[in-house]
Image (cartoon, rainbow, N blue to C red):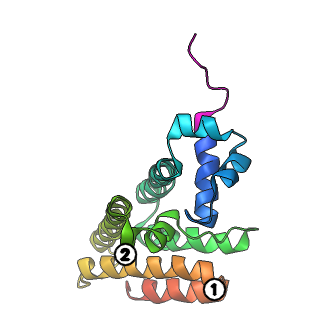
Amino acid sequence: MPWEKRFDIDQTLNRAMEAFWARGFEATSMQDLVDVTGVNRASLYATYGDKRDLFLAALRRYDSEVRRRLLDELGARETPPRAVAAVFDKFIRQVTQPDGNWGCFLINSALELAPHDPEIAAMVNSAQDDIEAFFLAMIRKGQQSGDFPEQLDATYLARQGLVTVLGLVVMIRSRPEEAYLHAIRDGFLSRLT
């Protein structure tokens, strides 16, 4: 009779994702993962592979369930100015939550692992390209609707939006002061008027 898993695979992956997101790859031990998931080490290895495989699965989950979903929802339901601001606001809200200043799992991974892990670098680069494309689409849509001036260089500003949000997310981890983070956001938004 085949062995049957006695735990929720998706819930376990979400818990592992949160542990890696909060602590990083190197600082999260297999024992930490056992503790946060409630799943024994052998079952984690049998289901996900080694720690790096579990990390990659968690990073993919974050990318599809958090980052992509956020951009898709904002692009579909918000006006261009509100959608652009909401990307920044999503991260700024973290600092008001207990133990919430984790930043962005993808950006944290870029800083920690991408310089020496080509697979993670490719995942991070792809996500960054998508964020830039989101800003570009919102700026162009805003130019068509009259929310943003037509003479703005949308491509340049989309890249600046990406760089600004990346910087903001890094600052959330090291300087989680709401007024400071709002000033970063507002500085970029002012360039769209």
In this rendering, the answer to whether 142 lies above or below 187 is above
Let me know if residue 145 is in the magenta part: no
Q: Residues within 10 Å of mark 1 (few under 14, many from 20)?
A: some
Which residue bears the numbered disc 2? 147
At which x and y percent is residue 130? Answer: 33, 62
Rendering coords of residue 174 (x, y %): 62, 83
Q: Is residue 75 visible?
A: yes
Q: Residue at x 56, y 39 (%)?
A: 45
Q: Determine the secondary structure under disc 2.
A: loop
What is the number of callouts on the image?
2
Q: Name the residue at 51% across, 46% down.
A: 50
The residue to which callout 1 is attached is 175
The answer to whether 70 appears left or right of 13 in the picture is left
Q: Is residue 189 above or below residue 100?
A: below
In front here: 180 or 10? 10
The image quarter containing residue 93 is bottom right
Q: Position of residue 169 (x, y in %)?
A: 53, 76
